[in-house]
Amino acid sequence: MGYVEFLQRTVDYIEEHLNEPITLEECARISGFSKFHFHRLFGIHLNLTLMEYVRKRRLAHAMLDIVEGKRVLDVALEYGYSSERSFSRAFTQEFGQLPSCARQAKYSLPPKPVLVEPAFPGSGHGGGMILDYLSEVSITTLGNMRVASAFRVGPEPEDEVVHSVEHWAKARGTGKEARRFGFDVPVSEEQQENGLRGYEYWVETDAPPSSLDGGMVIKEIEGCKYASLRITDPFADPLVRIPLGWRQLAGWVNSRGYQPSCDQERYWLEEVLDGEGGSVMDLYFPIE
């Protein structure tokens, strides 16, 4: 059994609890994944963050209620909005009209998603042409690591956190032989609504904690087995190549029956390597 069936449990749970508080932690618990695994897997399959998806499903049900004649204020409160004004703003942003103007709309509730094994290029699972910038998937192990870590939340958090950590590493004389990893981290619902994302960045180090700049911490990372894939020239088209790489990797893991490693917190890692032929990015999906 692949992991998709476990992820479907959370989609079903969300649909049944749209008029109640929904949190990343609870959805991850229901799926059986850590919050990092859930955050990444949900995004791959739904092409939305959890709270973006919840907001859209709530507004879809709210539209149906409006068409059926329910009071706007009652609908707003039913789906967790603090006021009719805030609900109307979200409704208008989603549907392009005020709730009061939507009562005569012809509307059918979009069906709840039924997740299937992700198709990926060259896999024989519905993919089209083979993409030569994505490698075959392999199984590898990363050993125990001691890293200096920092994270940022912002519109473009990668640039800020990488610059900050690399400035510290350069001041300490840390060379290119020290491995570097980055990865997305989930943020709060309010931060998502404000267009913010989270990103964490590591540099391998033997430095003492007292040497760290503000906002940095030392982490001891336990070794783990990974499914890995390489993207050639990832920044030629990063908004296409990197998501496709993760989708191919996740599809491969699921089709082989591997499970995400969930006994403790694991990380989906991205490692950029520069060489004479240009840059590559190795993706690491932790598995059991």
Image: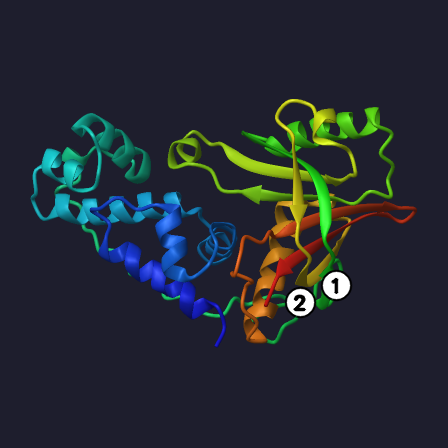
**In this view of the protein, can residue 201 be seen by the observer?**
yes
Tally of numbered tags: 2
Which one is nearer the viewer's eye here, 227 or 148?
Answer: 148
Rendered location of residue 134, percent (x, y): 72, 60
Tell me which corner region of the image, top left, top right, bottom left or bottom right, holds residue 112: bottom left
Where residue 74 appears, as percent x and y from the top left, is: 10, 38
Give the side of residue 9 with respect to residue 144, left or right: left
Q: Earlier in the sequence, mark 2 or mark 1?
A: 2
Q: Is residue 131 above or below residue 88?
A: below
- The residue tagged 1 is 135
- Nearest the camera: 102 or 148? 148
Q: Name the residue under label 2.
A: 129
Q: What element carries label 2?
A: loop
Q: What element carries label 1?
A: loop
Q: At 23% across and 57% down in the image, what residue appears?
A: 16
Q: Where is residue 212 in the image (x, y as percent from the top left)?
A: 71, 26
Q: Which amino acid does label 2 sit on?
A: Met
User: Residue visible at 70% across and 30% down?
Assistant: 209
Whether residue 113 is visible, yes or no, is no
**The C terminus appears in which quarter of the rendering?**
bottom right
Taking depth in this image into account, of 219 and 74 the one nearest to the observer is 219
Give the residue at x 38% y 37%.
Answer: 189
Side of 257 relative to 201 (left or right): left
For the residue pair 280 and 152, the one nearer the viewer reads as 152
Identity of the amino acid at label 1? Answer: Ser
From this view, report whether residue 265 is shown above or below residue 73. Answer: below
Q: Quadrant of residue 229?
A: bottom right
Residue at horizontal 86 percent and vertical 40 percent from the top: 176
